[in-house]
Image (tube, rainbow, N blue to C red):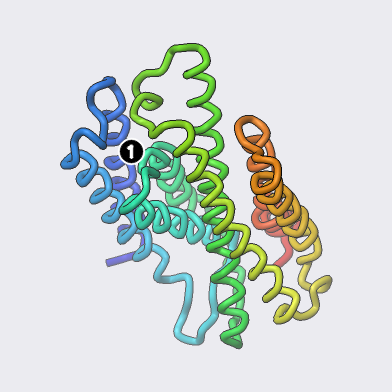
Amino acid sequence: MSTSLFGIYAIIAYLAASAALVHSLQTDYITTEKNPWLRFKILGLGWLAALFHGASLSDMCDRAGTVNFSFLSVSSLAGLSIVGILLLAALTKPVDKLGVIIFPLNAAIIFLKLVVPEEAHALKVHSWQMDMHILVSMLAYSFLNMAALQALLLALQDWHLRSHHAKGLIRSLPPLQTMEKLLFQLIAAGFVLLSLSLLTGFLFVENLFAQHLVHKTVLSLFAWLVFGILLVGRIRQGWRGQLAIRWTIGGFVSLMLGYFGSKMVLEWILNRH
C-alpha cells in the first residue's frame, strides 16, 4: 500500500476522532469522563490515525540511512510525536481535550504533505549521537507544544469561569488547579528534554554556522531561558494564572520559530538545504 493512501486513511481517522470529540462536548452532560465508552472510542480513533500517520512517513528514510528532512516531512513527524505523547498521557491524565486542536491540525499537515510538491532535503545520519540529538529535540518540541496548547485551554477556561459562561468544553475540563498542575508538568518535562537537546547539539553537531543552524540555536536558547525562569518563578514565587500562560506561549513561539520558522525560510524562500 502506498504512503499516500496511508496518509489519506490517517486524515479520515483524525477527522473522525475530532468529530467524536467535538460531539462529546456539544452538550453539558455528555463528557468523556461520564461516558468511558465514548472516551475509549475517541482515543481508539486517535491510535488508529497515529498508526496510519506513522505508515505514511515510512518513506522518510531509505535503505542507505538517508532521511528526508524537508519542512513538511519534519512537520508531519513532529505532529505524530505530539499525538503519540497525547495518547500515552491520556491513559493517566486528563489531556484528551487537547485533541480538539491536535487531531485536525495533524490532518491538515498530512493533507499539505500530500498536495504540496516539495523537494527532498536529505540528511544522512552517521552516528547514534546525532540520532539521539534529533530524537530528544523532537520530544522536547512535542512536550512544549502540548504545554502551549494546555496554556491556551487554561486561558479559555479561566475567562469563561470569570464571565460565568462555562459550558460544553469548559465544563468538561478538570478544575483550574489540576489544569495548572498539568501545565507545569508538561513544561518541566519539555524543559529537561530541551536542555538535553541543546547539550547534545553543542556536543555532536559540527559546523554550526555552515549548516545555517545559528538562528535555531539562539532562538532555542532563548526559549530554554524563558521556560527556566518560568519554572523557577513557579517554585519560588508561586507563579500561576495569566503570567504563567503568557510566559509559556512566549517561550513556545520562540522555540517554534527556532525549530520550524528558520527551516521554512531556508527551504521555501532562500531555497537552501
Observer able to see residue 261: no
Question: Of residues 11 and 254, which is closer to you in this image?
Answer: 254
Q: Is residue 24 above or below residue 72?
A: above
* Residue 250, image x, y percentages: 70, 41
Res 123 → quadrant: bottom right
Question: Going 48% across and 18% down the picture, which residue do you hit?
Answer: 160
Quadrant location, the C terminus: bottom right
Q: Residues within 10 Å of mark 1 (few under 14, many from 20)?
A: many
Question: Going 72% across and 58% down the picture, which residue do you hit?
Answer: 220
Q: Is residue 78 left or right of residue 32?
A: right
Q: Is residue 122 left or right of residue 81?
A: right
Question: Going 23% across and 51% down the picture, which residue do you hit?
Answer: 44
Question: Of residues 220 and 58, which is closer to you in this image?
Answer: 220
* Residue 56, image x, y percentages: 37, 62
Q: Is residue 26 above or below residue 209?
A: above
Q: Is residue 77 above or below residue 35?
A: below
* Residue 62, image x, y percentages: 47, 80
Q: Is residue 179 above or below residue 114?
A: above
Q: Is residue 8 left or right of residue 60?
A: left
* Residue 81, image x, y percentages: 46, 59
Which residue corresponds to mark 1?
18
Q: Secondary structure at mark 1?
A: helix
Give the residue type that dot 1 points to.
Ser
Observer able to see residue 173: yes
Q: Residue furthest left?
A: 37
How many numbered marks have been drawn onto this rendered protein structure? 1
Quadrant location, the N terminus: bottom left
Question: Going 60% across and 87% down the picture, which residue do you hit?
Answer: 126
Q: Residue furthest top?
A: 164
Q: Is residue 6 left or right of residue 121?
A: left
Q: Residue furthest front?
A: 236
